[in-house]
Image (cartoon, rainbow, N blue to C red):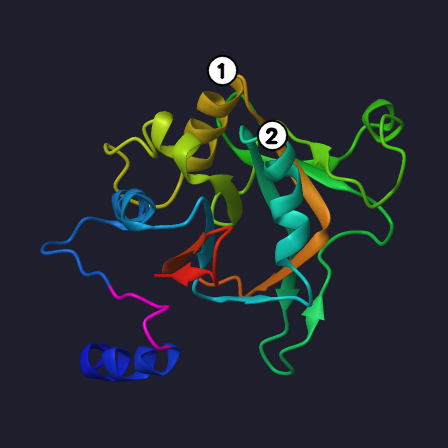
Amino acid sequence: DLDKKLEDYIERFNGKVRLIRNTEREGLIRTRSRGAKESRGEVIVFLDAHCEVGLNWLPPLLAPIYSDRKIMTVPVIDGIDYQTWEFRSVYEPDHHYRGIFEWGMLYKENELPEREAKKRKYNSEPYKSPTHAGGLFAMDRAFFLELGGYDPGLLVWGGENFELSFKIWMCGGSIEWVPCSRIGEFFVGMQYSYIIGISSEKTPISM
């Protein structure tokens, strides 16, 4: 049902949105890597399709990458109420959390340690994190491709966040959570995503 409807819908963006289809079923992870290769922007932003961005969400994600191209930036993810469409924080107010993992490779989040919080001059500053949830982040496109993108052996959702995080750290990069960038998400079972390419010259080019 989406075939012709989607093609008709994106015409309203006057060429700023491109629709790229795989010739065969590739799965979520390989398709994301293809999206990064097809993108024309200097920075790529991965988002799941069941997300809604908050006010002024993009500049805070781009600022750290501008200062260091090897930083991956991660927005703070709020839940979206399925009845009212309101953003609802899933975190304790005025506390910062970050992504961690157990040795069994189970992703978790815990509060930013005090020693790390004290390194920041302002409470709104980004802070480093060992890893991230996976689906939502911004990254220098060239650096992402230099790392090899996602491992093409990953077929479905799960584990790609660790794999990419380890490559970033081992290749001189870092991961930073950005408190001023808020994105709401419906926490659902099916995974779709879209990629935005950000260029310094003109408007974002989306896919």
Q: Which quadrant of the figure has residue 130?
A: top right
Q: Circle 2: is it few (<14), some (14-19), or many (20+) Cα within 10 Å?
A: few
Q: Circle 1: is it few (<14), some (14-19), or many (20+) Cα within 10 Å?
A: few
Q: Amino acid at mark 2?
A: Asp
- Look at mark 2 in the image and give the residue it sits on: 68
Which residue: 23% across, 32% down?
153
State the extent of the magenta-drawn residues as a range: 14-19
- Look at mark 1 in the image and give the residue it sits on: 170
Residue 206, horizontal then vertical, whole percent: 39, 62
Q: State which quarter of the image contains the C terminus.
A: bottom left
Label 2 element class? loop
Residue 36, horizontal then vertical, whole percent: 34, 45
Q: Looking at the image, is 115 positioned above or below residue 32? A: above
Q: Is residue 159 visible?
A: no
87 lies left or right of 24: right
| Name of the residue lying farthest toward the left | 23
Q: Amino acid at mark 1?
A: Met
125 lies left or right of 181: right
Q: Nearer the viewer, residue 201 or 37?
A: 201
Residue 76, horizontal then vertical, whole percent: 67, 51
Q: Which quadrant of the figure has residue 15?
A: bottom left
Q: Looking at the image, is 13 positioned above or below residue 99? A: below
Q: Nearer the viewer, residue 162 or 30?
A: 30
Is 163 inside the magenta-drawn segment? no
